[in-house]
Structures are given as structure tokens and as C-alpha cells.
Image (tube, grey):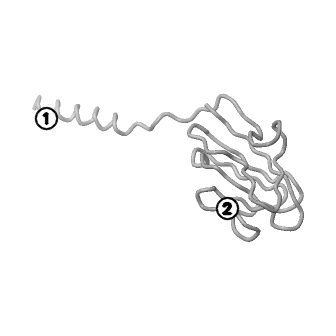
């Protein structure tokens, strides 16, 4: 009986140790428009423009169309966005990404009118 009780206790302790989640990414500081000139809004024109760089530590990122014209954006691993290919952002639209958003992103305008993007990155 003691051996059974000991085995049950060991298995219970061992399964709890394996079931623990990895530590959460806890943001400690923010960076705004890292790829913008002097931290300014990022101009989005007729060619793909980098808006977020790859990060191995970013907890969260926000990408927003801060202008008046639509734009399309994609992670660079999926290729360059085009006027008809990529996630569509109308004026004022934003995307909030958790740690899955650690990839680099590019954006392009979808009409003949340029727009601007704003990014905020939360870092540990």
C-alpha cells in the first residue's frame, strides 16, 4: 500500500511539473514607430515599405493605418503585399498581435493615394 501511495504522489508531482505553462511575456517598455524617421509615422506608398522588423522578444505589437487611404500588409515571410494581396487596412483600422506578431511586416498603399502607418511594440 505504501508503494502505491508513493507512486501516486510521484506521478502527481511529476505531471504538475510538466503541466506548467512557460512564463508569460511581460512588457516593460514600449517603442513607437521604430522604422519611422525619428519615430514619426511610417509613409506607405506605391512600393512595399517595412513597418515592423523581426523581433525574438516582442510581447505585443500594434499596426495601425493612421492615414486616410487604404493599405495592405503582410508578414515578409509570406512575400511582399500588393494593391490586391495582403491584409486590408482601411483608414483607422488596426491589428494587435501577441507573440505571434514577432515577424517582420511590410505594407503598401492600395490606391493612387499614399497613407501612413503607426506601430507600437511592447518589449520585456
Question: Is 79 placed left or right of 38 in the picture?
Answer: left
User: Which residue is farthest front?
Assistant: 47
Q: Disc count in the image?
A: 2
Mark 1 neighbour class, 10 Å CA radius: few under 14, some 14 to 19, many 20 or more: few
Front position among marks 1 and 2? 2
Q: Earlier in the sequence, mark 1 or mark 2?
A: 1
Write down the residue under mark 2. 80
Q: CA distance from mark 1 to mark 2?
A: 60 Å
User: Which residue is farthest bottom?
Assistant: 84
- Name the residue located 44 percent from the left edge and 38 percent from the top edge: 21
Residue 73 location (% of width, % of height): 71, 59
- Name the residue located 73 percent from the left edge and 49 percent from the top edge: 51
Residue 97 location (% of width, % of height): 64, 48
Write down the residue under mark 1. 4
Image-quadrant location for residue 46: bottom right
> Considering only vertical position in the picture, is 114 above or below 124?
below
Quarter holding the C terminus? top right
Element at label 2: loop
> Considering only vertical position in the picture, is 122 above or below 81?
above
Q: Depth check: 77 or 68 in front?
A: 77
Element at label 1: helix
Amino acid at each position: 500500500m505504501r508503494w502505491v501511495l508513493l507512486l501516486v504522489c510521484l506521478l502527481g508531482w511529476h505531471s504538475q511539473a510538466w503541466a506548467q505553462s512557460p512564463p508569460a511575456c511581460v512588457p516593460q517598455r514600449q517603442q513607437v514607430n521604430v522604422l519611422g524617421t525619428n519615430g514619426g509615422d511610417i509613409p506607405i506608398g506605391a512600393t512595399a515599405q517595412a513597418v515592423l522588423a523581426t523581433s525574438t522578444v516582442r510581447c505585443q505589437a500594434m499596426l495601425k493605418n493612421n492615414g486616410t487611404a487604404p493599405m495592405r500588409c503582410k508578414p515578409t515571410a509570406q512575400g511582399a503585399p500588393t494593391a490586391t494581396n495582403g491584409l486590408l487596412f482601411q483608414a483607422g483600422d488596426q491589428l494587435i498581435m501577441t507573440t505571434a506578431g514577432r515577424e517582420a511586416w511590410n505594407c503598401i498603399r492600395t490606391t493612387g493615394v499614399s497613407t501612413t502607418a503607426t506601430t507600437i511594440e511592447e518589449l520585456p
